[in-house]
Amino acid sequence: MMKKLQLLVVVLMLPLLAFAQKSVSASEILAKINRGEAVSYKNATIEGDLDMTKLQNMKMKQDGKNSTKEYTSTVTAPLTFVNCTFKGDVLAYFNPENGINLKISKNELYKTNFEKDVVFENCSFKEGAAFKYSAFDGKASFVSSRFAEEALFKYAEFEKGVNFSNVRFERDANFKYVEFPEMVSFAGAAFKQEANFKYTKFEGGVNFEKASFDGAANFKYAKISDNFNIKGARFNGGDDFKYTQLNNRQVSLTALLDMNK
């Protein structure tokens, strides 16, 4: 009887064990990146800051005009994180003078490029997440992830498809000056504070179907080619569509909503 009871307890515990997150140090992941190994984690809690801005292959380039030293690190293998929690910062951009804020130091900045696919699906970013100036040569997916602090993608360069469907942005979502060459999806995304797409170029169209904008929706000077899907999207905060262009024609939010009825 006792053995049967123990077996029953084990069987009942299996689903819980399957979803339990193991703890992984950020230093372990960085060691794999530095060795050029593919990184793949599922159901893991990442302890410490995942700072990819000072890899072993880091190179320095100096801008003669303003004496800024630009240090670029490169992640050469695929990154895959599924159902992971990042307790520290996830950094692909760092400015010693201003941290991960928007202003550029007069002296130096650090950034990280990604040569292969980057996947952060159903992940939770508890602290800062900075990908400013990063170049993504492969596909990028952040589907169903959650950003507790600012999601900083300003000036990021994407070469292939990008997916931010069902992402929850608790703080500012900064995509200012980003160029998306292929269709990008923010379907079902929740923007709790400012959604900054000022000067952003959606060259392959964009999908905001059923997205919610609780803060300011800033699309000033944005340029959209092909399709701008905002069916079922909710704009609960302020919005700025001044000089926004759809297929080279200036368009307002009211006109866009009418088009998507």
Image (cartoon, rainbow, N blue to C red):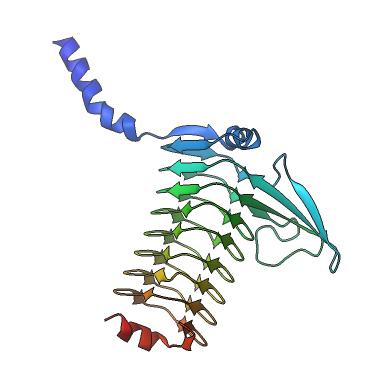
Q: Quadrant of residue 247?
A: bottom left
Q: Residue at the location (47% across, 38% down)?
A: 45
| Of the pair 67 and 172, the residue shown nearer to us | 67
Taking the image as shown, residue 105 lies to the left or right of residue 125, namely right
The C terminus appears in which quarter of the rendering? Answer: bottom left
| Of the pair 99 and 145, the residue shown nearer to us | 145
Instruction: Point out residue 59 in the picture as x, y percentages from the top left corner.
Output: 76, 48
| Of the pair 225 and 33, the residue shown nearer to us | 225
Residue occupying the far left of the picture: 1
Instruction: Point out residue 65 in the picture as x, y percentages from the top left corner.
Output: 85, 69
Instruction: Point out residue 97 in the picture as x, y percentages from the top left corner.
Output: 76, 59
- Is residue 254 depicted above or below 82 in this figure? below
**Is there any visible trace of residue 164 in the rendered image?**
yes
The N terminus appears in which quarter of the rendering? Answer: top left
Please tell me how many numbered marks the rendered image carries. Answer: 0
Q: Residue at the location (55% across, 82% down)?
A: 221
- Is residue 236 depicted above or below 111 in this figure? below
Taking the image as shown, residue 155 lies to the left or right of residue 84, namely right
Instruction: Point out residue 206 in the picture as x, y percentages from the top left corner.
Output: 42, 70
**Is there any visible trace of residue 52 in the rendered image?**
no
